[in-house]
Amino acid sequence: MYSKSIDSVTKSFKTELLSNYGLNRDAFTEVNTKSSLELSNLPAYENVLLLQGPVGPFFSKLARFLKQRGSKTHKINFNPGDEYFYPPKESNTHLYDFTLEYWPQYLERYIVQHQIEAVFLFGDCRPIHFPAKEICKQYGIDLWVFEEGYFRPHYFTMDYFGVNANSRLFRSESEFIIDYGNEIIAKQNDREITRYEWSHLHITRHAIVYWLVNVLQPFKCANYDHHRELNLVIAYRWIKNFFAHWFYKIKDWSKIKKLLQHQPSEQNNYFIFPLQVHDDAQMIHHSDFKSVEDAIEMVITSFYKHLSLHKNLATKLIIKHHPMDRGHKNYSEFIKNLSKTLGIKNHIYYLHELDLDLILPYCKGCVTVNSTLGLKALGSGVPVKNLGRSFYDKKNITSRKSLQQFWKNPGIVSAKNIQAFRQFVISQTQVNGCLYSPKYQPK
């Protein structure tokens, strides 16, 4: 049976994953001292396999890049939407049309028969991607996982064997990360990065096309079970998402204006709570909440107890809806009824379209379930309390206090620690680029 030694991984990425699975600082035997990752840092593979990518043409771009480097690129599609963005006319492209139960056997046989040396995929918690990790570990094959960037829109994530709470970062000590982050800062000169706009238009357009292509061909890939709902209702919700962006931009303006024109007593007295997408892996796999509603209820109830105990009438809680969930969920009635029942409706703001750069300077703290907006808050000097399992939820980075203690006194943020942490994370897991921008071309 074909097997490739882990030694083929270049020094910048060398890890002890096969023996230790990244449980400590040895997961990074030699850190990448460049400003960020580059796809050109990847080893030169002879045969690579692409599984499911992000919605849109990114994996087609990635395949062209890998082919230019001399790799024979294989792609397995799982539904008509995958085929739309990665056409079957491309060489070594296959459509998997069997059951999920048979998939691990199929994948293992394909990897062995085609002598695959590296597997690329987007999102390591999808059911079709679960088996890939164990098979890659078994055969000593490199597994590269993509995700939307921890510091988007100017970066996307590419990590070895897992992202978010499955990342090597999650099990690495904060002292180690901060020390190496400072070392990287000391060794490098500032490099100008390419900047990208986080385009609502491109993301929504790709999603609408992906869902419509799938629902218009219901009998193709009948055995396929998507990690999220995949039907005409969802296609409609993505269309709704596009128009909701403009609707809430107008609807929320008066509330935002009121928050920004606060009284002096309200200075730095806001808490912000960014919500997750209702069916995101961060909620389903990396937290103990059963739903977003469950998280909202816990946070609002805790905030009510804080107001009752400390009588701080100036304190407000701002709940920010996730932009990718606009057309799918609306928690207005739930939040209004709960806050009204508790008698704190004047202390709760629920907003869809909120520029964090405007509101963070007035925030006392940020409460989140693994949201990458927590990183943005930390970068703005706002203390963060994380309620899930996140790679950045570490000592000397986020708050170690209970939620009740956090409301009372969030503490302070060490700008030096955050800068070092950010630099380490970017240098080891972030590629300067945008998954959805037509402007971005892998290099």
Image (cartoon, rainbow, N blue to C red):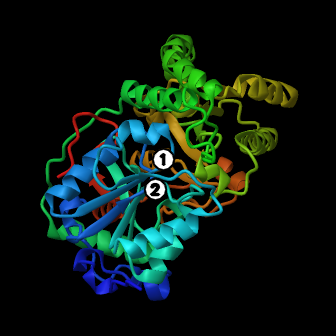
Helix, strand or loop at disc 1? Answer: loop
Q: Nearer the viewer, residue 410 or 177?
A: 177
Q: Sequence order check: which comes first, mark 2 or mark 1?
A: 1
Tally of marks? 2
Residue 269 visible in rendering: yes
348 shown above or below 41: above
168 shown above or below 246: below
Q: Measured from the top left, where is residue 26 in percent x and y?
A: 40, 85
Residue type highlighted by circle 2: Val
Density class for disc 2 (Cα within 10 Å; few <14, some 14-19, many ≥20) is many
**Which residue sits furthest bottom?**
19
Residue on which the image places disc 1: 382
Quadrant assignment, res 30? bottom left
Density class for disc 1 (Cα within 10 Å; few <14, some 14-19, many ≥20) is many
Residue on which the image places disc 2: 413
What distance separates the C-alpha of mark 2 from that of mark 1? 7 Å
Cβ–Cβ under 8 Å for marks 2 and 1: yes
Residue type highlighted by circle 1: Val
Quadrant assignment, res 304? top right
Q: Measured from the top left, where is residue 106 in percent x and y?
A: 52, 66
Q: Measured from the top left, where is residue 425 in percent x and y?
A: 36, 62
